[in-house]
Image: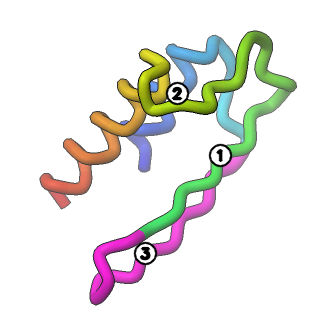
Amino acid sequence: MNQLKGILEVDFEDEVKSSYHDWNYKQNTGMITIEFESNVKGVVATSEETPILKDLINEVNRISIIV
């Protein structure tokens, strides 16, 4: 989570206030929720084709493989 928080802070130019995660290893599913110190400015990604969301998904996948 620390690596992911660092990347999000750089990408969104804001500090992460808190983060939550929950995993179901049997079903290979999970959820991550991030709360920033202030409102994130800019367009919210709604598609996996959006570069910042694609980068986030790739990073979560990379860290998941390591773990």
Q: Is residue 57 above or below residue 53?
A: below
* Labels 2 and 1 touching (C-beta < 8 A): yes
Question: Quick one: label 2 or label 3, which is nearer the N terminus?
Answer: 2
Q: CA distance from mark 2 to mark 3?
A: 20 Å
For label 3, the residue is 23
Question: Quick one: label 3 or label 1, which is nearer the N terminus?
Answer: 3
**Amino acid under label 1?**
Ile
The residue under the point 28% across, 35% down is 58
- Closer to the camera, 21 or 44? 44
Q: Is residue 47 magenta?
A: no
Task: Identify the residue at the far bottom of this view.
Answer: 26
**Residue 34 - label:** 1
Circle 2 SS class:
helix
Q: CA distance from mark 3 to mark 1?
A: 15 Å
For label 2, the residue is 8
Residue 14, given in percent of the width and then of the height, sits at: 69, 19
